[in-house]
Image: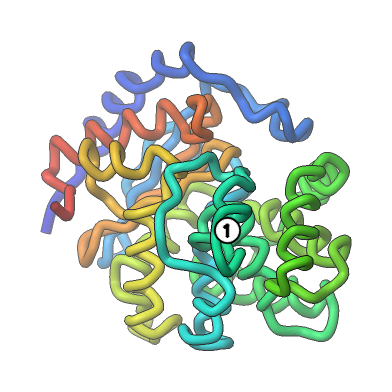
Amino acid sequence: MLVYKKEELVRFVEEAKPYARDGKVADYIPALGKANPNELSIAIYMPDGQVIDAGDVTVKVTLQSISKIIALALVLIDCGEEKVFRKVGMEPTGDPFHSIAKLEDMQPAKPLNPMINAGALAVTHMIRGGSVEERLVRLLAFVRRLAGNESISYSKEVAQSEFATAFLNRSLCYFLKQHGIIDEDVEELMDLYTKQCAIEMTCIDLAHIGLVLALDGRDPQSGEPLMPPDVARICKTFMVTCGMYNASGEFAIKIGIPAKSGVSGGILAAVSKRCGIGIFGPALDGKGNSLTGMKLLELLSKTYSLSIF
């Protein structure tokens, strides 16, 4: 088993931090614009329960697009592959995460994958429950089990900020509704989706979820299956092909770890059978990925030969 050294992690964090100068926080969501772009933290969760960290890992991060992979796992468990992939495809787009372009070109007009916003909205639509509140409770219960933390909730401030400014996502919803991909009230779906994106946790919680995926869906403490191995496999495959937005190909070549980013600056990564990784670095590149987080993962991957390729 690899031994990660805290002093080496601290050095990697300091080496990656200067890259923040080339990025900016996601201020198009007003509440996220308050983040300090120079923050950077990482936690690595090992199968034996050991956590190695650097930076302020007590800071809470809203999941944003990282929540897409968790919602996908829940819906695959609820509905099965056949139903899910009737509504959303499996292919990378090469387009920005909020693009509507491919939807207009596709016949039938379904989102190409669950990691772009249109696909994520279609997946969230499939979360079972009789109300927004009931569906959110089910999603939060699943998140808490994956993170091993019963105190996880969502940021009302961030959810409200996103709900008030999510005009493009509403447009995607109406397009999906026109083409029969969703059939619920758009405002209710937006209410659920913005709360889903605003679920918040620490880097340690993120790393624990990454470890569950790395262990093919099993709880690292109890060995209990939290999701079927096939669901974990599908999620990790999407993390490789689409997890870093339209930079996923370059990320696979340079770093080669299944990972999912969010515009809060969070990154969730799963190194098969070896560890889960949680990172927070809110300075983003033009594609919505954490600049400092990606540099940190690049240093880790090269030092410890973590690439799956």
Please, what secondary structure does the residue beneath circle 1 have? helix
Query: What residue is at 33 percent from the left and 50 percent from the top?
Result: 44
Residue 89 appearing in the image:
yes
Q: Which residue is mark 1?
A: 67
**Residue nearer the viewer, 25 or 185:** 185
Q: Could you say which quadrant of the image residue 300 lies in?
A: top left
The mark total stands at 1
Task: Give the x, y percent position of residue 11.
Answer: 27, 24
Position of residue 231 measured from the top left corner of the image (x, y, whole percent) = 40, 78
Tell me: residue 208, above or below residue 56: below
Residue 92, x across and y down, in percent: 41, 54
Q: Residue at x 45, y 50 (%)?
A: 93
Q: Residue at x 53, y 36 (%)?
A: 265
Residue 5 seen in this snapshot: no
Q: Quadrant of the N terminus?
A: bottom left
Q: For the residue carrying disc 1, how many other residues have a C-alpha within 10 Å: few (<14), some (14-19), or many (20+)?
A: many
As rendered, which of 249 and 75 lies closer to the eye? 249
Query: Would residue 112 appear left or right of 135 to someone viewing this image?
Result: left
Q: Position of residue 182 (x, y in %)?
A: 73, 72
Q: What is the three-letter code of the residue carrying label 1?
A: Ser
Tell me how the rendering is colored: rainbow
Looking at the image, residue 23 lies above or below residue 54: above
Quarter holding residue 297: top left
Please report the residue visible at 26 percent of the width from the left and 45 percent of the height from the top: 252
Frontmost residue, 230 versus 246: 246
